[in-house]
Image (tube, rainbow, N blue to C red):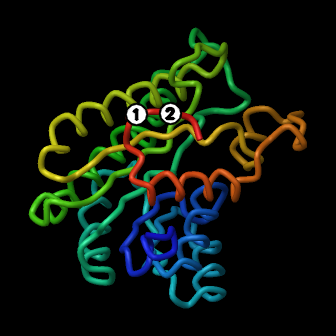
Amino acid sequence: MTQTTYWHHKKVVITGGTSGLGKALALQLLAQGAQVAIIARTAAPLKALAQEYPALIALQGDVSVKEQIHPLAGEIHARLGDVDILIHAASTLGATPLRPLLDTDCEDLEQVLQTNLIGPFRLTKALLPGMVLRQQGLVLNISSDAAVSAYATWGSYSVSKAALDHLTRVWDAELAPQGVRFLALDPGDMATPMHFAAIPDADPGQLRDPADSATRILELVAAEDFSHVRRGV
């Protein structure tokens, strides 16, 4: 089966779909015949993408807000139907410039966890029943090398990604026997707005194009390469 054949008619939901890796994944999936819904907080880029790509389902919402999860899930089911693949690409660094943990407000850590960990958990729970009933599906969590390496000032983000990695492993252990797989992938350091917010003087020439990371991720998924719950791409 070719990669394009694999993605043809797949129903995919992507959070953080208007920027960086999320946007790159959405556009490549559309080009390969998938039905794609993206979720993002800000209306303007959603509207612009929906106008440029009429087949794209653009949903405004914030996964860090508990009260928005079930309305989002309901709209996804109404407009897309049963979801085959859920990709959690939405992420936040927390307060910038990045600061040591000693100087990190408890509320800032809480907000990072809400976006990077609790939000994905809630949306996954809301969309999982259909996957379990059909005994097929994939939840892909976008991770980071910060989940395994301790970088000074990256504390909130690192903690959230480490927890997301382990959440992925537990979900996979519980639901792989029922045909639903969970995968956490580190896309590498990319030239994205979030990376430059963290490291304003980063050299763009040393960073990956998000489109390249997206291509590699889609190749791995199409090949059903789930030999590692977390790996770099």
Q: Is residue 30 left or right of residue 118?
A: right
* Residue matched to label 2: 231
**Residue 207 location (% of width, % of height):** 80, 41
72 or 7, nearer to the observer: 7
In the image, 169: left or right of 33? left
Image spot of residue 95 (x, y percent) = 63, 33
Question: Could you classify mark 1 by the number of other residues whose Cα lies within 10 Å: few (under 14), some (14-19), or many (20 or more)?
Answer: few
> How many numbered markers are drawn?
2
> Residue 88, percent across and down?
44, 51
The residue drawn where x is 31% and y is 45% is: 182
The picture places residue 217, in percent across and down from the top left corner, at 54, 52
SS at circle 1:
loop
Which residue is identified by label 1? 228
Q: CA distance from mark 1 to mark 2?
A: 6 Å
Tell me the quarter of the picture where residue 22 sits: bottom right
Question: In the image, what residue occupies the spot 30% across and 32% down?
Answer: 169
Q: Are marks 1 and 2 in contact (CB under 8 Å)?
A: yes
Q: Is residue 84 above or below residue 88?
A: below
The quadrant of the rendering that contains the C terminus is: top right
Query: What's the residue at 48%, 69% (across, down)?
Result: 38
Q: Amino acid at mark 1?
A: His
Question: Helix or strand or loop: what does disc 2 sit on?
Answer: strand
Q: Nearer the viewer, residue 225 or 52?
A: 225
Instruction: Please report the residue visible at 58 percent of the width from the left and 83 percent of the height from the top.
Output: 50
Kind of residue at disc 2: Arg
Would residue 227 appear left or right of 99 to someone viewing this image? Answer: left
Q: Nearer the viewer, residue 229 or 17?
A: 229
